[in-house]
């Protein structure tokens, strides 16, 4: 059931919410590969040399392995959220972009840079938000609500972006919705229901919400977080808005990954409890080396946990498959030209809106 909180309207459209049993396989282990003695160092050297030889630049997400973040930093690439990843790839002169992240990030890079070659360490890294918003169901839903402006999160496939009026990331989603609301527009939002709910609460906009969710953020637990905070009353709580409402309510700062990293630099607190993927700790420690970071509690902690505070698809990016794509030029992203052209319109709006808001 899809629900518009602003209108208290219920519409029977699939899919239902994606909860803890998502109905598709997760990739399994989120451990890094067991590198043989000396292999890690050799791969890092090889990747550095290949990036230069192939006129390639590494664009890595904050949730990827810290070796990849370190190489991106040291070779003139970037480590960023999905908005900045898109913008960086767009303005960098390299002819090949190597995107370490999940598939929609590679597609977004290709949409914005159709003339460039876009490679990814793996093409199997999915995202539950993207999987939870299949075009075959989403497009008819948009068609059934023609009076609404379609705003989609960047975590969607190219075909969904092609049907959208706007693409946004969490760093500018509230600003874009405020802007549309001021123009009197009613919103159809997809795919993340928690982020959609958060934007609706903050903006008061009339929003009809698709009901997908992030398997990492939806597992953070408010009660356990409260208990942890009681033991660390001096810690600030940082929460990504893909988390459930009860978790967001406990936050000192709610925001995109970039906003949360900024918060650890700016706040006086020496301790932070962080409700987002723990890959972000690499950049948080760089931003504030003397401070302490703790994961917010999530469900099912322990050996069998597949997505507690770390995205199992992001974890599929590692040194071995990064070196492999640079050696052989495999795992190239292709977006059909007509889809890419349509998706570019909505994606370009995001880039231009972000540039104008700076
Ligand atoms: S952390 Fe969540 S939103 Fe990000 S890629 Fe993984 S499943 Fe998707």
Image (tube, rainbow, N blue to C red):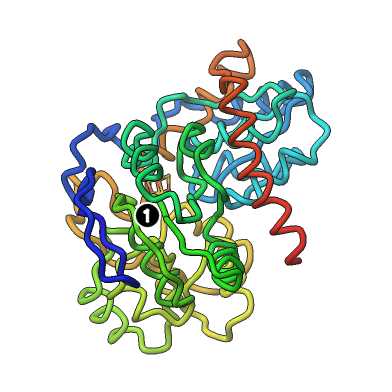
Residue drawn at (58%, 18%), measured in percent from left and top?
332
Is 349 in front, or is 79?
A: 349
Which residue in the rendered view is the most extreme toward the right? 93
Residue drawn at (26%, 35%), measured in percent from left and top?
26
Above or below: residue 96 compared with residue 126: above
Is 243 in front, or is 324?
A: 243
Residue drawn at (80%, 38%), measured in percent from left and top?
92
Image position, residue 226 (x, y; %): 26, 81
Image position, residue 234 (x, y; %): 42, 88
Would you say the beta carbon of the disc 1 residue lies within 8 angstroms of ligand 1? yes
Image position, residue 358 (x, y; %): 76, 66
Q: Is residue 153 visible?
A: yes
Is 318 in front, or is 170?
A: 170
Q: Label 1 crowding class (10 Å Cα cut-off): few <14, some 14-19, many 20+?
A: many
Residue drawn at (59%, 36%), measured in percent from left and top?
343
Which residue in the rendered view is the most extreme toward the top? 328
Q: Helix, strand, or loop for circle 1?
A: loop
Report which quarter residue 23 is drawn in.
top left
Q: Quadrant of the N terminus?
A: bottom left
Q: Is residue 289 visible?
A: no
Is 79 in front, or is 358?
A: 358
User: As drawn, is 151 to the left or to the right of 10?
Assistant: right
Q: Which residue is the site of mark 1?
A: 192
Above or below: residue 327 compared with residue 231: above
User: As drawn, is 78 to the left or to the right of 27?
Assistant: right
Report which quarter residue 316 is drawn in.
top left
């Amino acid at each position: 059931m899809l629900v518009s909180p602003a209108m208290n309207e219920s519409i029977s459209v699939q899919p239902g919410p994606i909860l803890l049993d998502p109905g598709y396989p997760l990739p399994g282990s989120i451990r890094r590969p067991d590198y043989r003695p000396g292999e890690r160092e050799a791969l890092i050297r090889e990747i550095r040399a290949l990036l230069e030889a192939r006129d390639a630049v590494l664009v890595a997400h904050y949730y990827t392995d810290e070796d990849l973040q370190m190489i991106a930093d040291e070779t003139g690439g970037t480590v960023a959220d999905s908005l900045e990843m898109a913008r960086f790839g767009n303005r960098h002169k390299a002819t090949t972009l190597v995107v370490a992240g999940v598939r929609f990030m590679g597609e977004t890079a290709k949409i914005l840079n159709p003339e460039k070659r876009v490679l990814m360490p793996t093409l199997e890294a999915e995202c539950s938000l993207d999987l939870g918003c299949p075009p075959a169901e989403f497009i008819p839903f948009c068609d059934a609500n023609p009076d609404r402006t379609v705003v989609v999160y960047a975590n969607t496939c190219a075909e969904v972006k092609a049907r959208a009026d706007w693409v946004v990331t969490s760093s500018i989603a509230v600003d874009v919705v405020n802007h549309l609301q001021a123009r009197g527009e009613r919103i159809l939002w997809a795919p993340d229901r928690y982020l959609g709910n958060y934007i609706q609460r903050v903006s008061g906009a009339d929003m009809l919400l698709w009901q997908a969710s992030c398997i990492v953020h939806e597992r953070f637990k408010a009660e356990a977080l409260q208990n942890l905070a009681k033991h660390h009353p001096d810690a600030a709580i940082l929460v990504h808005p893909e988390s459930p409402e009860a978790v967001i309510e406990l936050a000192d700062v709610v925001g995109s990954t970039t906003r949360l990293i900024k918060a650890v630099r700016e706040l006086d607190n020496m301790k932070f409890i962080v409700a987002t993927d723990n890959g972000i700790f690499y950049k948080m420690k760089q931003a504030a080396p003397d401070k302490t970071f703790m994961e917010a509690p999530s469900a099912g902690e322990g050996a069998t946990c597949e997505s507690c505070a770390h995205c199992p698809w992001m974890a599929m990016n590692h040194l071995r498959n990064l070196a492999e794509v640079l050696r052989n030029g495999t795992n190239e992203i292709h977006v059909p030209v007509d889809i890419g052209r349509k998706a570019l319109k909505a994606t370009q709006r995001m880039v231009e809106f972000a540039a104008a808001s700076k």
